[in-house]
Image (cartoon, grey):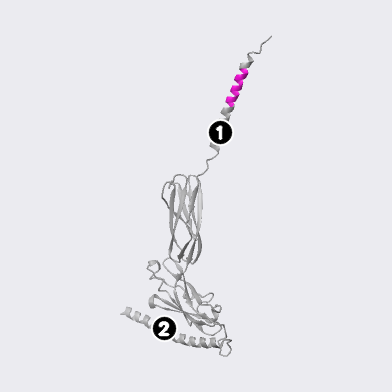
Amino acid sequence: MRSNRGAGPVGIGGTLLMKRDTTIRIFSLLIALAVVVPAVQAALTVDAGSDRTVLAGEPVTILATCNDTDVFDAMNLSASIDWSTGATDAGIVQDDEHNGTIQATHTYLAAGTYAVTVKVANNATGAVACDTLNVTVSPQQAEVKVVPKTLNQKSNGVMTVFVSLAEWLGFAGADRTNVTVSDPSEFAIGNATPEKVNFCMKDGGTLILKYRRQDLDLATGDGNLTVTGSAVTEEGNVSVAGTGAVSVINPGNGKKGENDDGYAWAAMVKENAKEKVKNQKEFREEQQKGNGKAKGQAL
């Protein structure tokens, strides 16, 4: 009869071999997973900064900051800025081993609000970060004088608006001696455009614009009117605006006896007469000074 005593050791050895084989397989599987599953990408962030306000034609500088948990490597990082009017590449200056600064400058010519997006990419890890700020562009301010200062929109005649360009010709300390106005008739008050335009060289340049009173859509009680337009500089057409004081009375038809407010009508007639004389005097003086300068240059 055969004995089974020798089977014990063989069974134990087989079990040990099986356990060892299983351990090797699990270890191999872990190595495979480590190769297949990519490591978590380092966090890349960018801060575009706070919203900005600037005048048309003046440069605005963006100073954005970026941070990467990976060690800063300028060779792997790239930055660009979308100004809403176009995009440009921007350089990144390293601040320390994890932080950098993006600086770029842009000039807006037209008034409005623009969304500016700063984008930073780590070309080694594939990480991308973006942040946006708003830049509000206001028109360059021009000095505006209104004659007469009382407006009855239903009366006949014109209202004269003097727009002085001297104040903003040198904005931002730049030499703007070659600034011109391409089309003075584009200077508007709301939807109203001037019926007649003159240009006087006094004090660097004054536009003399005449608007039909009936075209000026101002509500009773309004304390001012705003003139908007543009002028040509080295960079292009720059938005210009100015505000002049005016008093809008209860509209009548401009004829005595038919206005609901006789006192207002009388005051308006008196004011118009005074302002008309003053307007004519100032215009003659401006022409004389302009002619005097021209004669001096000719000599």
Residue type (three-letter) at the residue carrying disc 1: Leu
What's the residue at 50%, 54% (across, down)?
Answer: 131
Q: Is residue 12 left or right of residue 170?
A: right
Q: Which residues are magenta?
A: 10-21
Extreme residue toward the top, this view: 1
Residue occupying the far front of the picture: 263
Q: Front-most of 83 and 47?
A: 47
**For numbered disc 1, what is the local secondary structure?**
helix
Q: Quadrant of the C terminus?
A: bottom left
Mark 1 is surrounded, within 10 Å at the Cα level, by few (under 14), some (14 to 19) or many (20 or more) other residues, namely few
Asked whether residue 16 is in view, the answer is yes
- Residue 186 visible within the image: no
The residue sitting at 37% across, 83% down in the picture is 288
Tell me the element at label 2. helix
Q: Answer above or below: position of 3 versus 247.
A: above
Considering only vertical position in the picture, is 285 above or below 232? below
Position of residue 291 measured from the top left corner of the image (x, y, whole percent): 36, 82
Q: In x, y percent, where is residue 91?
A: 43, 53
Query: Who's the residue at 63% across and 16% down the image?
Result: 8
68 or 280, which lies in front? 68
Distance in Å between CA atoms under marks 1 and 2: 93 Å
Furthest residue in direction bottom, as rendered: 257
- Pick the front one: 186 or 131: 131
**Amino acid of disc 2:** Glu
- In the picture, measured across the screen, residue 293 lies left or right of residue 237, that is left
- Answer whether residue 11 is magenta in the image: yes
Question: Label 1: which residue?
Answer: 30
List x then y, in percent, for residue 17.
59, 22
Along the polypeptide, which appears first: circle 1 or circle 2?
1
Indicate the position of residue 259 as horizontal and vertical percent values. Answer: 57, 87
Q: Which residue is mark 2?
A: 282
